[in-house]
Amino acid sequence: MSVLVLVLAVSAACCLGFGFVLQQNAASHAPLSDFLSPRLLLDLIRVPRWLGGIGLMVCGMVLGAIALGKGEVTLVEPLLATNLLFALALSRHQTKQPLGRQGWAGLLLLAGGVSAFIVAGQPQGGDAVDDPLRHWLIIGIVVGLALMLTTYAKRSRLSAGPVLLATAAGLLYGLQDALTRVSGQRFGDGGWSELLTGWQPYAVLVLGVTGLILVQSAFETAPLRMSLPALTAAQPLAGIACGVGFLGDQLRTDAGALAGQAAGLAAVVAGIVLLGMHPAMPSGTAEPERSRDLQPH
């Protein structure tokens, strides 16, 4: 594993984690009439704290894109999942809550799970799969799942809605990471002309904006502990599926390696859930009168 890729991916995770906390702090006070609407971004753009969070997120995405250009998606995505550690660190500073057993257990599970997956899988790059049907099938499944989750989220609103929206956003962000790598490869092969004549960079932009609206709507209607774990868990799973599915990333496939990878991913998800539910995470729920506005009529 390249030390440069490790540093870039962890730095990206740091920026993303800090950015998510600042965004949720601001989005929790946004008008609920803007739920799942582009107007939400227009309202939030006037809030300095939200702009700071977006700036950090953009820095994280740029660092993540550079890491994806130099390493495999199956390697970078689990490292990006550590953004929750940095989100918890900032939230803990804000709330003055100690880590306790739950925090330490979540931290060890997340860090250990990422390490176990990388050691067991030994991700390596390979040639992209030259099969358009397989390529579009995987993209269709990811986008279709995100659309289905968003549809259900619109019906459930304050109950399961934030979790579903965050999961949908995570799926789109994982796909966005995969297409970012493809865009980087096109740019490396033929420069700007090669990049701009492909559909991938435009898809990256659409996925980014759509994911941002979903995330801010989730942040707007529920505490960070409800939305960020789902986002953080879904993104690497979708990214790894795309990396292996059509980018040509290779993982070890013997029985022991597969068991280690499965155990590592399970530990990552468990650690994310424990950290996301930690009392240090901002509670920032909607005020009662705002909550009533979200109930179905």
Image: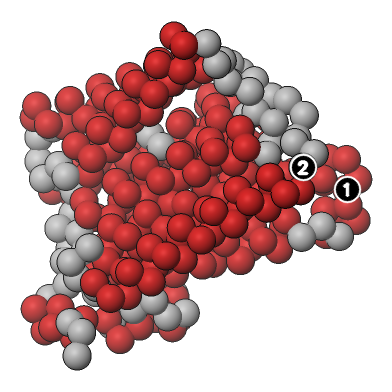
Amino acid beneath label 2: Asp
Q: Which of marks 1 and 2 precedes in the sequence?
A: 2
Which residue is labeled 2 in the image? Answer: 131
Q: Quadrant of residue 89?
A: top left
Residue annotated with mark 1: 191
| Left or right of 87, for residue 199 | right
Residue 81 placement, left or right of 74: left
Judged from the image, the secondary structure of the residue bearing numbered disc 1 is: helix
For the residue labelled by badge 2, is the local secondary structure a helix, a strand or a loop?
Answer: loop
Residue 121 location, x and y as percent? 51, 17
Disc number lying in front (2 or 1): 2
Q: Quadrant of residue 5?
A: top right
Quadrant assignment for the N terminus: top right
- For residue 49, above or below residue 29: above
- Is residue 50 visible from the viewing direction of this image? no
Q: Nearer the viewer, residue 143 or 267?
A: 143
Between 225 and 117, which is closer to the camera in this rendering?
117
In depth, the one of 144 and 186 nearer the eye is 144
Q: Position of residue 7 (x, y in %)?
A: 53, 26
Q: CA distance from mark 2 to mark 1?
A: 24 Å
Query: Residue 260 appears at what percent x and percent y?
Result: 40, 15
Residue at image location 44% in from the left, 75% down from the top: 41
Report which quarter residue 221 is drawn in. bottom left
Q: Residue placed at 8% from the left, 78% from the top?
A: 288
Rendering coords of residue 61 (x, y %): 55, 48
Amino acid at dot 1: Gly
User: Which numbered disc covers residue 266?
Assistant: none
- Give the quadrant of the C terminus: bottom left
* Residue appearing at x 21%, y 51% in the figure: 225
